[in-house]
Amino acid sequence: MKKIKNYNSNFKIVLLLIVIIFSSITLLSLPVLFDYKSAKKSIEKLISSEFKLDIDIGSNLFYKPFPRPHFLVEKSTINLKSNKSELNLIKIKKLKIYIPIEEIYSKSIKNISLIEIKDSNIELKFDDIKNIRKHLIYSINKPIKITNSTVFILDKNDDVILISPIKKINYRIDEENKYKKFHILGNLFNIDFNSEWKRYYNKPKETIHTIKVKNPNIKIKNKFIFENKQQYKGSSFISLMDEDIVINYELLNNNLKVFSPDVTNNQKIKIFSDIQFVPFYFNSEVKINNKELNFLVDDFFHYFFRYDKEFLANINGNLYFSFSNLKNKFIKSGKINFKFEEERIKFLGATFEIPEIGKINSKIKYEEKNKELVFFSENLLSINNHINFAKIFQINSKKIKKIKKIKFNIEKKLNEKDFLISNIVLNDNQIKVDDNLSFVVKNIQELKVFARDVLN
């Protein structure tokens, strides 16, 4: 009896080996048994119907059995079915077309499970990006994978304005959980990012888009609800270096309203804006709370003084910044105003409040000096309370009593703490000060010493 059992067991093992060997030989010999070159047209039609893409297979098909049965195409191009651009959207160096295992024994290919694009260039114009969005929203397609490729964003003259290497894109429908997903692992401006777009079919008007960046640590989550081209709304949650920016927005009758609700305790920046699209005009206010003054000088405002006019075409409006609870020994609040007009950003002035002393009106600019970006400001301090001014700076109150205005310039290299004070004028030059007097200030104590030397 034991011999019979051993015989049956050995027979099953031998039979399994025969099946594996026969299947392997069959898989490897398929290119001989079937002419897949003649299947190019039918595969192009299948990709068009099942993936909603127009493909032109420009080279021969090569059958590859491992690790999964697929065809390899070494040269081809792909366009979206709705793409009217003269450019080929994707110039493909390696295209893998995966087929179900049962299809390999068929005389004709009737099903494709996945296409994978590798080592390719993706050229996009603005209209192409809009067509991709339509594909995301409206197309029912099978899984598409893109690996080790590069995205080029082109302007209207076909000049490259942005390059983004892409490590991986997964674009598929999760049939079990009933949603569509577009997932990107890529790099932009030398910063790696992880982007995931989702649309649940039980909420067809709503999409959720999440972007994560590790260095610096940034997370953006946007929920978008689309009714029609004239009406939509959404919300964005931005977590930036332990700071939260929350924005709600709503478009109605060609006007977009943006506002920041109170959601978390880390909202140091809030945005309020009314935007009209035809003609385009905006009024926006950005409220900044509990920030360092150096943050504004080094990391924020220089973008508004050094810009490319090309990106400001047809942009008109007013932008106001208001500051409160600034982390500074003297300046606690303030306002800065800009006007966007005729492809220019015009600086309209800045005012900073010094509690119980007075206020400073400033003219600000940024310039390149010895290949370094430098902050310059011309300032006028109006003193409303000379007694408090004298106490803080430890100056004889009788001497300061006559001084109502102090003009002075500040110069500071970005990302350095030291700043230079120069060109000091008292009471519109009624009280004389050494014209060559200047002083490098490193801290508050040095500033007080300098003030005493000038004013006593």
Image (cartoon, rainbow, N blue to C red):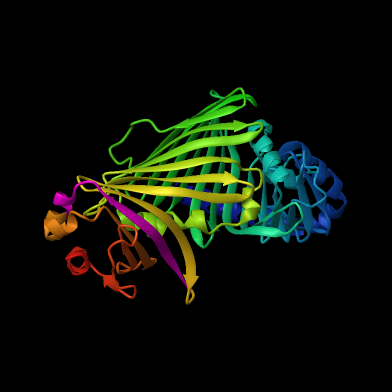
Residue 273 horizontal/vertical position (percent):
48, 34
Residue 103 horizontal/vertical position (percent):
73, 43
Which of these two is toward me, 255 or 333? 333
Q: Is residue 238 left or right of residue 135?
A: left
Q: Give the dominant element type of the magenta stretch: helix, strand or loop.
A: strand
Which of these two is toward me, 38 or 381? 381
Residue 388 in the magenta stretch? The answer is: yes
Which of these two is toward me, 51 or 281? 281
Q: Is residue 107 visible?
A: no
Residue 4 horizontal/vertical position (percent):
50, 48
Reply above or below: 325 against 274.
below
**Which residue is at 50% across, 53% downward?**
304
Which of these two is toward me, 51 or 356? 356
Reply above or below: 357 against 398.
above
**Which residue is at 27% across, 63% downward?**
431
**Which residue is at 27% across, 51% downward?**
331
The magenta region covers 372-389
Which corner quadrant holds the C terminus?
bottom left
Q: Is residue 448 left or right of residue 11?
A: left
Residue 245 horizontal/vertical position (percent):
39, 41
Q: Is residue 437 left or right of residue 51?
A: left
Residue 241 in the magenta stretch? The answer is: no
